[in-house]
Image: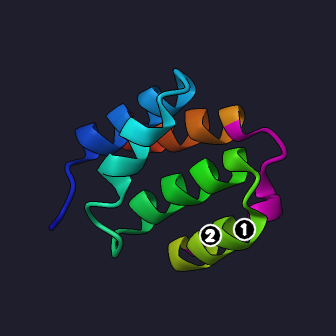
């Protein structure tokens, strides 16, 4: 299933609002989409589950170390989705 960009942007908004379970439910719907995987990675980074986060970063073609602040990372992801 392909997730609409607007839904991925919504997942970012939910994560920024600390509604992580709701954001997680959205991104889990398409585990083949790189942006979905990237948001998924950030959610696990926020949870403190570095091993799981690193897995999702690899799936997304991104790097765990690229952003120190998960909120800034989510904001950057949302910007790419709404451009």
Whole-percent x and y of residue 2? 18, 63
In-image side of 57 versus 17 (left or right)? right
Location of residue 1 by image quarter: bottom left
Q: Nearer the viewer, residue 42 or 52?
A: 52
Would you say the residues marked 1 and 2 are in contact, meaning their CB atoms lie under 8 Å apart?
yes
- Front one among 5 and 11: 11
Task: Tell me how many marks there are.
Answer: 2
Quadrant holding the C terminus: top left
Q: Is residue 24 magenta?
A: no
Q: Which residues are magenta?
A: 61-70
**Residue 14 horizontal side relative to residue 66, left or right:** left
SS of the residue under disc 2? helix
Q: Position of residue 49 (x, y in %)?
A: 72, 60
**How would you rate the neighbour count of disc 1 (Cα within 10 Å): few for under 14, some for 14-19, many for 20 or more?**
some
Task: In the displayed orientation, state which residue is furthest to the left.
Answer: 1
Sequence-wise first label, 1 or 2? 2
**Residue shown at 84%/45% (left/top)?**
68
- 14 over 76 or under it: above or below: above
**Element on which disc 1 rests:** loop
Q: Quickly name the residue at label 1.
A: 63
């Amino acid at each position: 299933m392909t997730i609409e960009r607007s839904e991925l942007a919504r997942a970012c908004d939910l994560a920024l609002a600390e509604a992580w379970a709701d954001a997680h439910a959205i991104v889990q719907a398409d585990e083949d989409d790189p942006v979905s995987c990237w948001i998924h990675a950030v959610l696990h980074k926020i949870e403190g589950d570095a091993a799981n986060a690193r897995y999702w970063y690899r799936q997304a073609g991104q790097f765990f170390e690229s952003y120190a602040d998960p909120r800034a990372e989510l904001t950057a992801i949302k910007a790419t989705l709404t451009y």
